[in-house]
Image (cartoon, rainbow, N blue to C red):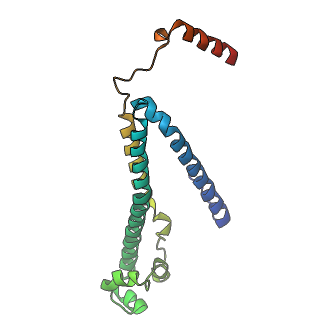
Amino acid sequence: AVMTTSDPFVALCLFYAATMVTFSTYGAGFSTMPAYVADVFGTKNVSAIFGRVLTAWSAAGVLGPLAITQLRARASQRAAVELAEQIGEERFLASFHAPLQDLDSLLASKAVTLQRLLEIAPAGTVDPTPYMYNEVMCCMAAIQLLAILSNSRIHPHPGLSLPSEQSLPEAQRDDESREGSVAR
């Protein structure tokens, strides 16, 4: 279900709440990663493997925002072109004193903005700004899906075997059973 509101304060509070939930899961993933790496690959090379995980994480921290910015800019450019086409050559020329072919340079100089295009757009034109991040979010979801699929392909190393209860010495099994009865 999609929750919508016309009150900007409520929308801002919902955005902050969603952001805080997302940020809280970031720390959880970071704190469980060493144990996950040890379970999957064994404890011998945890430091080296976790170093690679942190390197990939930091690369994503740099490249992710750059990718989001580029996707957002592309969506904004596409929206401006669509609005300008709806406005038409004559009305565009009258409003901005430049031909429609100069749209890219006018956008770069901020002489033309989506808001200004919407002001002169025909009645009933849909405001594209609420949909500017659709492509960004779809790309992020696709990357997350790829990460989930990649993670599902990771299996413990065949040479790594965790001790089963039968392989434990008798004294250690007795200690564990006593600890279990105390915890219950």
**Residue drawn at point x = 37 percent, y = 44 percent:** 146
Q: Is residue 20 found left or right of 45 in the rendered image?
A: right
Nearest the eye: 26 or 165: 165
Q: Is residue 56 found left or right of 19 in the rendered image?
A: left
21 relative to 63, above or below = above
Q: How many marks?
A: 0
Residue 172: quadrant of the picture: top right
Q: Is residue 177 found left or right of 91 in the rendered image?
A: right
Residue 100 image point, x, y percent: 33, 84
Q: Is residue 7 found left or right of 133 in the rendered image?
A: right
**Residue drawn at point x = 60 percent, y = 12 percent:** 175
20 relative to 126, above or below = above
Nearest the eye: 72 or 116: 72
Residue 169 image point, x, y percent: 50, 9
Q: Is residue 129 visible?
A: yes
Residue 158 image point, x, y percent: 33, 23
30 relative to 20, above or below = above
Nearest the eye: 118 or 164: 164
